[in-house]
Amino acid sequence: MKPCNLEIFERQADLYQTMANAKRLAIVELLSHGERCVGSIAETLDVSVSAISQHLRNMKDKNIVVTRKDAQTVYYRLKNPKIIEGCHLVREILLEEMEAQGRQARNYDEDSVLTN
């Protein structure tokens, strides 16, 4: 049997490690609806601008987001929209597991996941 090249799995693990943060997952969800600036993200998530900036810097370093500058404002968007598909698939798995255990996902609504 030919030895397995683990590079792709190492890259996948690195991506998972970057995304293993609730605030970063919330940022991805926000950006799935279009580009946003740091202040807008911080206000929506009720997190400091400096904390959001740090998360976005990390996500940019890992090629999850890209930027566009308009005068003094920097806008962020997902580099590859498939990242949101992956996040949604994992969320669906978790919701199915909750239901299988007899637990209801309390009023979970995909369209308003960040408005509570």
Image: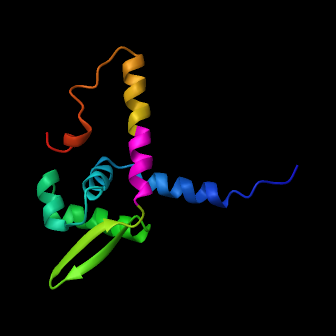
Position of residue 60 measured from the top left corner of the image (x, y, whole percent): 37, 69
Judging depth in this view, the residue of 107 and 18 nearest the camera is 107
Q: Is residue 68 above or below residue 65?
A: below
Is residue 48 visible from the viewing direction of this image?
A: no
Q: Residue at x 32, y 55 (%)?
A: 28
Q: Quadrant of residue 109?
A: top left
Residue 83 lies in the magenta-colored region: yes
Residue range of the region highlighted in magenta in the rendering = 81-90
Residue 12 lies in the magenta-colored region: no
Q: Quadrant of residue 101?
A: top left
Q: Residue at x 88, y 49 (%)?
A: 1
**Prevailing secondary structure class for the magenta stretch in the rendered image:** helix
Which residue in the rendered view is the most extreme toward the top?
A: 102
Judging depth in this view, the residue of 106 and 17 nearest the camera is 106
Q: Quadrant of residue 112?
A: top left
Position of residue 86 measured from the top left corner of the image (x, y, whole percent): 45, 48
Question: Image check: 65 left or right of 75?
Answer: right
Which residue in the rendered view is the most extreme toward the bottom?
A: 71
Q: Residue at x 30, y 56 (%)?
A: 32
**Total number of numbered discs in the rendering:** 0
Judging depth in this view, the residue of 23 and 111 nearest the camera is 111
Position of residue 104 measured from the top left corner of the image (x, y, whole percent): 29, 20
Which residue in the rendered view is the most extreme toward the right?
A: 1
Q: Residue at x 47, y 51 (%)?
A: 16
- State which quarter of the image contains the C terminus: top left
Q: How is the image coloured?
A: rainbow
Is residue 22 visible from the viewing direction of this image?
A: yes
Position of residue 87 measured from the top left corner of the image (x, y, whole percent): 40, 46
Question: Image check: 50 left or right of 103?
Answer: left
